[in-house]
Amino acid sequence: MKILLSGATGQVGWELARTLLPIGEVVEVNRTQADLADLKALRGIIQQYKPNVIINPAAYTAVDKAETEQEQAFLINAEAPGVLAEEAKKIGALLVQYSTDYVFDGTKSTPYTEDDATNPVNVYGQSKLAGEQAIQSVACDYLILRTSWVYAGRGNNFLKTILRLAAEREELKIVADQIGAPTWARLIAETTAHIVRQAMLERQVNNFNSSVYHLTSSGDTSWHGFAEKIVKIVREQGKLALKNRTIHPIPTTGYPLPAKRPANSRLSTSRLEQQFGLTLPSWDNALRLCMQELD
Ligand SMILES: NC(=O)c1ccc[n+]([C@@H]2O[C@H](COP(=O)([O-])OP(=O)(O)OC[C@H]3O[C@@H](n4cnc5c(N)ncnc54)[C@H](OP(=O)(O)O)[C@@H]3O)[C@@H](O)[C@H]2O)c1
């Protein structure tokens, strides 16, 4: 099985380049070989490699910058996945696309299911939703995996920011009124490998249904709860000297950003767990394992 993988320099893509190894021959295409903003070149790459599976974790992920770079965000997050879907359909490949909790407005009081109405409150969320819709309208075989609050031991993310700030500052102020599930990039990548393998077996016997799935850790917390847990684990590990003494909870209004964020980012993962017979671990368990690998 030949797997074409974009975005292998990103958090999820870097992990995918490793977790996909046992299920097929992985061909990595980075920005130089396949710039998602160059739709013609993108088509050429798929036609050249003719993969059985296209996995696309590459995306325009700068949530705040997207507010002023709408055109670029839509080109990469909406038009490019549409082109990948068209090319996948031509060659009978499976397309795996990642999407986000930010397709929802966050006003629901319980976790969102895949069937809940979408209503993104920022440009990034709008562009990712448009990407989902572009794939669905082409109707190739696809898996759209919506995840949330992604972190990893490498790259720029909330975990790395808190580790840095907690080493430098006695006091931190972190937003406590947005709720979601922090999700380790490796968990996303390992789960992807499992479900792609099953999906390819289902396709062989004409028993595959394209669908949207929610893929996050289980449980939930706020950004403030996430930060407190990071600091607690660092202290238990005793690996890093921390100046931090207090993390103050603040409302979203106390930390204004260009892009609005949903207050409720919780995604129900029952559909994925039932369909693929998987159990997604709690966010704090996965965080502890991720942090064991940090220097
Ligand atoms: N991060 C989150 O909290 C979060 C939450 C929900 C959903 N998601 C979704 O999950 C997926 C993976 O996110 P991530 O956090 O792993 O992303 P990331 O770490 O920001 O990595 C993004 C990747 O996309 C590549 N890329 C960006 N623009 C490109 C272009 N024009 N052409 C080719 N490659 C390009 C980057 O390449 P360079 O290294 O060359 O820039 C990088 O490899 C994305 O679909 C994202 O929307 C993320």
Image (cartoon, grey):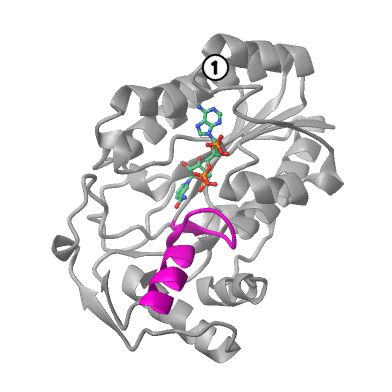
Quadrant in the picture for the C terminus:
bottom right
Position of 226 compared to 20: left or right?
Answer: left
Q: Residue at x 40, y 44 (%)?
A: 115
Question: Eyeballing the image, is 286 above or below 42?
Answer: below
Quadrant in the picture for the N terminus:
top right
Q: Position of residue 197 (x, y in %)?
A: 77, 44
Q: Residue at x 45, y 20 (%)?
A: 79
Q: Residue furthest left?
A: 253
Front residue of 138/48: it is 48
The amino acid type of the residue labelled 1 equals Val
Front residue of 205/267: it is 267
Is 161 within the magenta?
yes
Position of 274 compared to 214: left or right?
Answer: right
Front residue of 2/259: it is 259
Is the residue marked 1 within 8 Å of ligand 1, measured from its CB? Answer: no
Any part of residue 182 in sight: no
Q: Position of residue 87 (x, y in %)?
A: 63, 15
Position of 99 compared to 69: left or right?
Answer: right
Question: Eyeballing the image, is 115 above or below 156?
Answer: above
Any part of residue 39 in sight: yes
Magenta residues, start to end: 149-168
Name the residue tied to disc 1. 83
Is 167 within the magenta?
yes
- Helix, strand or loop at label 1? It is helix
Q: Position of residue 231 (x, y in %)?
A: 45, 81
